[in-house]
Amino acid sequence: MARSFQTYPEVLLSSRDIALEIHRAVRRGELRKLHGRLYTRNLTDDADVIIQRNLWTIVGLLCPNAVISHRTALEMRPTESGTVFLTGTYDRRIHLPSLRIRQIKGPGRLEGDAPFVHSLSVASQARAYLEVLKTKTVRGADSPSLPRMQLETKLDSLIRTGGEDKANKLRDSARPLADVLGAHDAFNELDRVIGALLRTRAAALAAPSAIARAAGVPYDPFRSELFSILHSALTIWSSTGWPDLQSDSVAFANIAFVDAYFSNFIEGTEFEIDEAIDIVFHNLIPSGRPEDAHDILGTYMLVGSLHEMSRSAVDNCRDAAEFLAMVRFRHAAIMGGRPEVNPGSFKTRSNRAGQTVFVAPDLVEGTLRHGWEMLRSLSEPFHRAAFVMFLVSEVHPFDDGNGRLARAMMNAELISGRQRRILIPTVYREDYLLSLRALSRDQRAEPMLRMLNRAQEFTARIEFADLNHALDVLRGCRAFESDSDSILRMPDDSRS
């Protein structure tokens, strides 16, 4: 009876015992050849798809007892050209559709290497770093090594996620392997780079994140990429730039009150509008909620100060140190009524919102400095406003009050640039948060920019000289509604 291969794995390797039956199965149309002695029972999908789906199984079948090594052990994926690197008993190259296997002669499994699929092993991190550093010449994606900048970036990431102990353990594990691998020069180089990153010795570095860590101001490279994406989007974004035509001090105080009210409502500090008026304009602090009242009052004292809101983070800060001082000062002004959240002091514990984990405490200062370097290259008020709002929001540098601070920083850029500030009404809260997530999680900046542009237009269409009239217009636009099904309406008149 003919052997059925339908119960076999999707890919299989011919051997002397079943070679004849595989040949017959191919003739019957039950199997097809992928490469050499490698076959599949999948007669439908493209060979590329099958190979990618069974990548490590195929590598294990074709190169038994090999060690996944060099750059592949650090990245655990093929290079851009589809190459994986192994160490085995002899040099070997295998070319399949969409996959190249390069086996380099070297020692088999060593202490610290981990078992993997079939008979494969994965080189320890220490071994992989030594192998990569031992390979002096880097020739693009087909090289078993990595460019120096990538290597330093990986070591910086190792310290960022695992702490200094992780780097020290890596170095300790690599030391005895240097003899076995004949990689003493490679170990010395690894030792120099780790020492520089830990600031225990001097060494030339190339990667920006590594240089920053060695200088004592490490930053979050993932957030840096997000800031670059936003910066690029802003350079081609054409905003309306709604001018602020209301120079009257009463109108300024009224719109600042609404700004403080909405900004706190977004963060869960909810008052009826009449209660908020009493707190801000009559200093009536509810006995049962003094902290919440001080949140609104503190926010208003900042966003209602024409002096402070006319100070641009770009035009009024000569360097990153002054920018950090401004951020701390404004946070202290907003959260001064809550000493338990350390107003004006950067966080010492990690914080998160839902699934988003914000920048780690030890990376806050460096990430803000890195963002400020991008911010100061922007000239349009709306561009600066959008960037600094996202910068503060994404870093989340304080224990609490980050959202209120981000929006205050945003509006200071607009007001100092003689543009109308942006209000985020209660009904617009989900649009606001979802647009931030689109950039944070999906690297899409346009939703946030469209959202802010619409919010600025909405604000610009309302006259704030008479607070009661402005509140009536806001109610008519559903601005105070918290129902997720409600939609913000634009005021009918150009100046309602």
Image: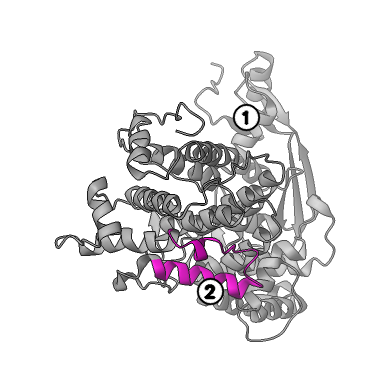
| Foreground residue among 196 and 34 | 196
Tag of residue 325: 2
Nearer mark to the viewer, of 1 and 2: 2
Name the residue furthest left.
Answer: 288
Image height of 44 relative to 263, above or below: above
- Residue at 70% x, 26% y is 33
| Foreground residue among 69 and 288 | 288
- Residue at 62% x, 71% y is 320
- Which percent across, then down, holds residue 462? 45, 38
SS state under label 2: helix
Image height of 403 relative to 171, above or below: above
Q: Quadrant of the C terminus?
A: top left
Amino acid identity at mark 1: Ile
- Magenta stretch: includes residue 488: no
**Pointer 1: residues within 10 angstroms few (<14), some, or many (20+)?**
few
Mark toward the start of the polypeptide (1 vs 2): 1
Q: Which residues are magenta?
A: 304-333
- Which percent across, then down, holds residue 72? 67, 54
| Foreground residue among 52 and 452 | 452
Amino acid identity at mark 2: Ala
Marks 1 & 2, CB-CB < 8 Å contact: no
Which residue bears the numbered disc 1?
18
Residue 400 lies left or right of residue 362; in this view the side is left
Residue 91 visible in the picture: yes
- Residue at 37% x, 48% y is 258
